[in-house]
Image: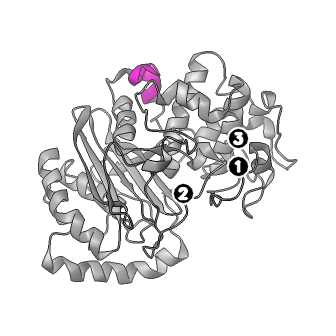
Amino acid sequence: MHPPFRPDPMRRSLLPLLLLLAGGCAGDGVGILDVAPGGDAAAFAAHLEAALPGEMAAFGIPGMAVALLEHGQVAWSRGFGLADPVRGVPVDPSGTVFQVASLSKPVVAWAVARLAEEGRLDLDAPVESVLTRWHFPESDFDVSAVTARRLLSHTAGTSIHGYLGFDPDVPLPTLEASLDGATLGLGPVRLIADPGRGWRYSGGGYTVLQLLVEEVTGRPFAEHMRDAVLQPLGMTSSAFDWADGLRPRTAVPHSVRDAPLPNYLYRAQAAAGLYSTLSDYARFVVASMDGAGGGGVLPGPVAQGLHARADAAVGYGLGHQRFTLADGRVLVGHVGLNRGWRAFWLMEPAAGSGIVVLSNSQDVYDLPSRTICAWTRAVLSATIVFPVGIAGCQGR
């Protein structure tokens, strides 16, 4: 739902207290950031086994799932805690389904890139020349400069930062209605800045891409994503809609106060609607590595090209975030946050190393980010440099 680097007011107000509390807990056990550099995936896995249960208990985080990648393959994966605390259902790496929020966006970038490779879509053509079911409202900005490439990189000047999700008992609006403003008060998708002149995170731009995919393929978005990307990668427990087969295995989301929440649903599926298991999403990350050949979905160079810094973007490629380590190395991944869920993945594509973290808690402590930071310290021997606003790599 939310952008990667904009904590909510509650998080800002509680974070100092939580950091103090975390330090107070450290005396009785191993903290997630208490990790020595220079290790490997096996050593870091042992550290997680020791550290995560205590950190989760201290901050009321019901469940997490973590996968470590080495040499372009999954080296270790584990579920921690409970997918459903009321029924006592444990988190299972291959069985538990999570909402992965904005981790949807890199997968969508693959689908759009594949359409371009097939000659069905021009990344640099005005999207208005393709759209028929909906058009941008009138504005002072040049709508002809809105392209698929700029929508993918958040440089198209579109509105709506992130979506809230609808109560599962309420019928979802149509895609056109969502674009026109059926967004729980967030307004319509419109141009609010000059396309191509700067970076502005926009889930709304991905909703335009969702419509573009439907218009180009003549198929519902979730169906096309299943056939074009998910199934070819073997992601058989993943979907961009809450498919019947996934519902019994979906974890129960929880708020920042460890209270269960409804499984909020998204018409803006491209921005925030992907459901996946840890094992499935790790398949996508493996396919994204250098030398993986794009998993048979994209030519390898095209898949890797999505990681490159986009024009006018700061720390972003096409559907992928770019993170810089203190030693200058650039990593690729994405952060996700929906109501009741957190997710994060990160990789060093050339080395074949990576990590995926999924959680059914919108925890203020942001344990997924801290787990990612501990991984960079332990396995990559460097500290990740987050933009201002993320505390995941700060000390305990």
Q: Is mark 3 on a helix, strand or loop?
A: helix
- Rounded to the nearest angstrom, the CA distance separating label 3 from label 2 is 17 Å
Camera-nearest label, 3 or 1 = 3
Which residue is farthest right? 138
Residue 345 percent across, percent down from the top left:
37, 47
Q: What residue is pinned by disc 1?
A: 158
Amino acid found under the numbered disc labelled 2: Pro
Q: Does the magenta stretch include residue 302?
A: yes
Magenta-drawn segment: 294-304
Q: What residue is pinned by disc 2?
A: 3
Residue 39 percent across, percent down from the top left:
12, 49
- Identify the image's colour scheme: rainbow, by chain, secondary structure or one colour: one colour
First reached walking from the N terminus: tag 3 or tag 2: 2
Q: Is residue 211 left or right of residue 199?
A: right
Q: What residue is pinned by disc 3?
A: 208
Q: Is mark 2 on a helix, strand or loop?
A: loop
Asked whether the residues under the numbered discs 3 and 1 touch, taking CB atoms below 8 Å apart as contact, a structural biologist would say: yes
